[in-house]
Image (spheres, rainbow, N blue to C red):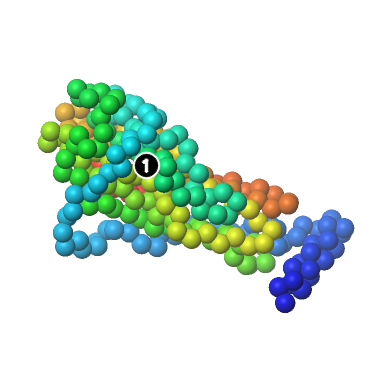
Amino acid sequence: MRKLAVLLVFMFSSFLAQANIPDPYYQISDMTIEVLDSSEGVHINSKPEPTPNPQVGDVIATVRQIIAFGKEIYKIVVAGKPVINTEYAPISVLPLETEFGKEITPMDLSLWQPPKFMKFKVTYKNGLGAEVVSFTYNINMSHGGKFRGKGSYITHAQIVPENVSVAWGYTFNAQMSLVGLTNLGTEENPIAGATIQLSYTVSTVLKEDRNNMMIFIAGDGTIQAM
């Protein structure tokens, strides 16, 4: 039955191509982003000390007294399949102006708060109204780490793919990168902020559609889609 359906789609597409008519199956008509869940309002009975990844990765950005570690670009989905980046350190945003300098690690800070997360779903529909791409992922982090009682910093920030569904004839890729650092606090008591960009592409034999989503995270626990 599936082979027959694929054959019919191919025959219909061939007819439209010969008639120079755009095939609605390969045309993106709608894209939506929704928040499915978050740690806001979730009651946690205990506050375990998180165990940040001991690898901080490369220095990827600095701004005044704040430094970010990790990797410049993280591939999240390649050709419709989730990528598990276990070999790469998640993003950490830590204080720079300390005796540790660029050798500082999350373990040099204390009072880390329980991890926070926010789950999103991206959906693409084609010209026939059918869902052709569904991508569910969450962004999570540990926050609030203090250096000698001051500041609020970030560690273990990452985007984790949970589910990817891609229709026949479509290709979906996604990647994330750090695009900006800010200090929401004062020089004496910094609150680290970071803007993460999630870039994804949907392509067919006819067209490629590119989109970006900005997500802002901060040491005070903020996770906000922009």
Percent across and percent down for residue 181 are 35, 33
Left or right of 202? Residue 12 is right
| Residue drawn at 33 percent across, 59 percent down | 38
Looking at the image, residue 18 lies above or below residue 9: above
* Rendered residue at 48%/60% (across/down): 163
Work out whether residue 54 can be spotted: yes
- Quarter of the view holding residue 64: top left
In terms of depth relative to the viewer, which is nearer, 139 or 47? 47
- Asked if 212 appears above or below 22 in the picture, the reply is above
Circle 1 residue:
90
* Badge 1 element: loop
Foreground residue, 35 or 150?
Answer: 150
Kindly give the residue lying farthest to the left in the view shown.
Answer: 149
Q: Could you tell whether 42 is left or right of 5 in the image?
A: left
Q: Residues within 10 Å of mark 1 (few under 14, many from 20)?
A: many
Q: Position of residue 171 (x, y in %)?
A: 63, 53
Residue 184 seen: no
Residue 44 on image: x %, y %: 20, 61
Mark 1 residue type:
Pro
Rendered location of residue 201, percent (x, y)? 59, 48
Q: Quadrant of the N terminus?
A: bottom right
Picture quadrant where residue 152 is located: top left
Q: Number of labelled discs?
A: 1
The residue most toward the bottom is 1
Residue that lies at the very extreme toward the right in this rendered image? 18
Give the residue at x 59% y 65%.
Answer: 131
The residue nearer to you, when weighing 60 against 213, is 60
The residue under the point 67% across, 62% down is 168
